[in-house]
Each structure stands twice: as C-alpha cells, then as structure tokens.
Amino acid sequence: MKAITIAALAAILVAGASLPASAEMAGAAGLGGESYGIASWYGPGFKGNRTASGEKFDPKALTAAHPTLPFGTLVEVSRRDRKKSVIVMVTDRGPFVAGRAIDLSRAAARRLHMSTQGAVPVRMQVVGKTE
C-alpha cells in the first residue's frame, strides 16, 4: 500500500511539473488571452489518424494540439526570436512531453520556420473560435 501511495504521489508531482504552461494558457482562454511556452510539431506518422476532436489529422492543415483549450479555438502562435506567426485551430490534445505548451502541424511549423529545429519558444494568443 505504501509503495502505491509513493508511486501515486510521484505521478502527481511529475504531472504537476508540466501544468504551469497549460494552466497559464487555460486562464488566457478568453479572446486576446496570451501565454508563452515551447512549441513543437508533429506530423508524418499521424497523417490520417483521428484527432481528439474526431477530425482526421492532416499535416498540411494549420492545426494544433493543446492540453486545455477548447477544440475550435484559434490561436496565433508567434516565434519570440523572429517576426514569424501563424494562426492555428486547436483540434487535438497534447503535447505529451513535459515542458511543451503546444504541438503544431507540420504546415504551421513550416510557417514559423521551425521544421528543422523541432521546438522553439513562442507566444500564444487566443484570437477567436470557429463555429
């Protein structure tokens, strides 16, 4: 029993380590709300798979995975080190790597010139909602 309690506590602590970026963005979910974090991208291996919203993933679409924002939320993602930005629609959940705030489709990553880097610091701002 004690081992389970320690394991459960460790899992909560590990999960909590990735919460600040998510919690910060959740608080900024209103129109104009902004947050900062690390963006990564995903794509080739997921093409055609169903996203958490039920849509088929298309790496050529301007979409993103975010842990807390409602599906259909439009987010402007801007590189902090360059004058590059893209508006994406949240269609999936993720990222599932600690320290990451948002996962972008390959098309969105290309617009930010981050395809070869994998992860970059970004500013995220909620700019609207579809539907």
Image (cartoon, rainbow, N blue to C red):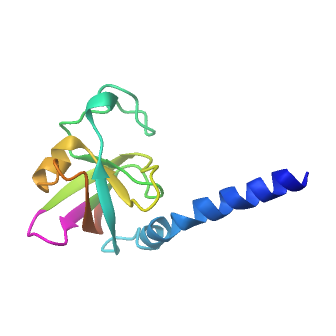
Q: Which residue is drawn at 41% across and 68% down?
A: 29
Report if residue 131 is visible in the image: no
Q: Residue at x 20, y 57 (%)?
A: 87
Identify which residue, 79 or 93, lies in the foreground. Answer: 79
Identify which residue, 101 or 25, lies in the foreground. Answer: 101
Q: Is 49 above or below relative to 117?
A: above
Q: Is 7 above or below relative to 50?
A: below
Check the image and name the residue furthest to the front: 3
Number of numbered discs visible in the structure rendering: 0
Q: In which quarter of the image is residue 2?
A: bottom right
Q: Is residue 80 magenta-colored? A: yes
- Percent from the top left, x then y, of residue 94? 44, 49
Q: In which quarter of the image is residue 8?
A: bottom right
Asked whether, in this view, residue 17 is left or right of residue 69, the answer is right
- Percent from the top left, x then y, of residue 22? 47, 65
Q: Residue at x 33, y 30 (%)?
A: 46
Identify which residue, 22 or 26, lies in the foreground. Answer: 22
Check the image and name the residue furthest to the left: 83
Q: Is 21 above or below relative to 40?
A: below
- Percent from the top left, x then y, of residue 41? 28, 47
Identify which residue, 129 or 15, lies in the foreground. Answer: 15
- Percent from the top left, x then y, of residue 13? 65, 64
Check the image and name the residue furthest to the right: 1
Asked whether, in this view, residue 53 is left or right of residue 123, the answer is right
Report if residue 24 is visible in the image: yes
What residue range appears in magenta?
Answer: 76-84
Q: Is residue 55 magenta-colored? A: no
Q: Which residue is drawn at 59% across and 59% down?
A: 15
Q: Quadrant of residue 37?
A: bottom left
